[in-house]
Amino acid sequence: MKYKESIKHFFRQSKSDMLFDIFNVTLMVLLLIIFLWPLIFVLSASVSDPAAVITGKVLLLPVEINLDGYKAILEYDEIWIGYKNTIVYTVVGTIVNLIMTICAAYPLSRKEFAAGNFLTAMFMFTMFFSGGLIPTYLVVVKLGLIDTIWAMILPGAVSVFYVIIMRTYFQTSIPQSLYEAAELDGANPAQILMKIVLPLSTPIIAVMALYYGVAHWNSFFDAMIYMVSPEKYPIQMFLRDILIENKVDLNMIGLDPAQAEAKRQLAETIKYGVIVVASVPILCFYPFVQKYFVKGVMIGAVKG
């Protein structure tokens, strides 16, 4: 019924509105194809016959389903080490990020905080002028954080950009009258934050958790700089080794050329399989915060 009403509404429009709708829908379909094709191709290549992948027969849909790549990945011990480390870095890092961001954004959002504007300006200054990689590395070395979990978390514990976003949310989405009512009831700033501000800030907290979590999950540059022990590498480091340096454990390769070729083809399939294995957890997490995403990213929009 709604479909028929939409069709009737479309033909009742003026020609200019119809042309705009046609152009808009066509553009969205093209963008959908552009964004979805690489994802579908990677998924199809990961479950296709290695020979078909090597010869370019896989264009969109799988060709001759073959799960040997995933079997080899599950037997690759480093993948599970990377998974464990990445989960730890992501969970602990996101918690630290949220705590630090909230603790910075909340006082900056309060009008009675006299130094709020000055500190906000100082924070924003660091967005445009920073020490750079070498000074940051020297600080991490001097603090003794090299090859520890904190080297992956503390250097990026606070994002000034996200602090500004969260501060704006606190200022625009939580009425001043709630603060005043809580203060009249004898609540201190910490109680106001824990019992009033945070329960009303679920959308922005969910969005920040997604942003921070994805950044930690995809992080490999920090590990490449600060991590020395391979057993502490995140999964993205092993993914980098496989994709860029092609470091796949092929010790079973013999001198037989046919066997060597089969292993080479399997290595090509493993590349796509690792991408899927590394991306699935974060893709599964996204639907849980999707309902908060639109509301969170619209912070600061003009309100009528």
Image: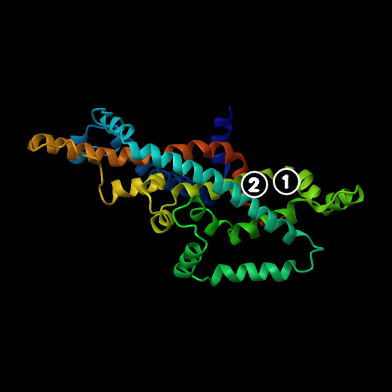
Residue in the picture at 25% in, 28% down: 66
Q: Which residue is mark 2?
A: 205
Q: Are marks 2 and 1 in contact (CB under 8 Å)?
A: yes
Q: Residue 179: x, y in percent?
A: 84, 52
Q: Is residue 232 above or below residue 265?
A: below
Residue in the picture at 65% in, 50% down: 99
Q: Which residue is mark 1?
A: 198
Q: Please tell me how crowded label 1 is: few (under 14), some (14-19), or many (20+) other residues with Cα within 10 Å.
A: some
The one nearer the camera, 261 or 37, is 261
Q: Residue 40: x, y in percent?
A: 35, 38
Which corner quadrant holds the N terminus? top right
Q: Secondary structure at mark 2?
A: helix
Query: Splitting the image into 4 quarters, where does residue 119 fall?
Result: bottom right
Query: Splitting the image into 4 quarters, where does residue 128 fall?
Result: bottom right
For the residues marked 2 and 1, what is the alpha-carbon distance in whole angstroms?
A: 8 Å
Query: Residue 145, can we see it?
Result: yes
Q: Earlier in the sequence, mark 2 or mark 1?
A: 1
221 sits to left or right of 268: right
Residue in the picture at 52% in, 49% down: 15
200 sits to left or right of 223: right
The one nearer the camera, 233 or 45, is 233
The amino acid on which the numbered mark 1 sits, given as a three-letter code, is: Leu
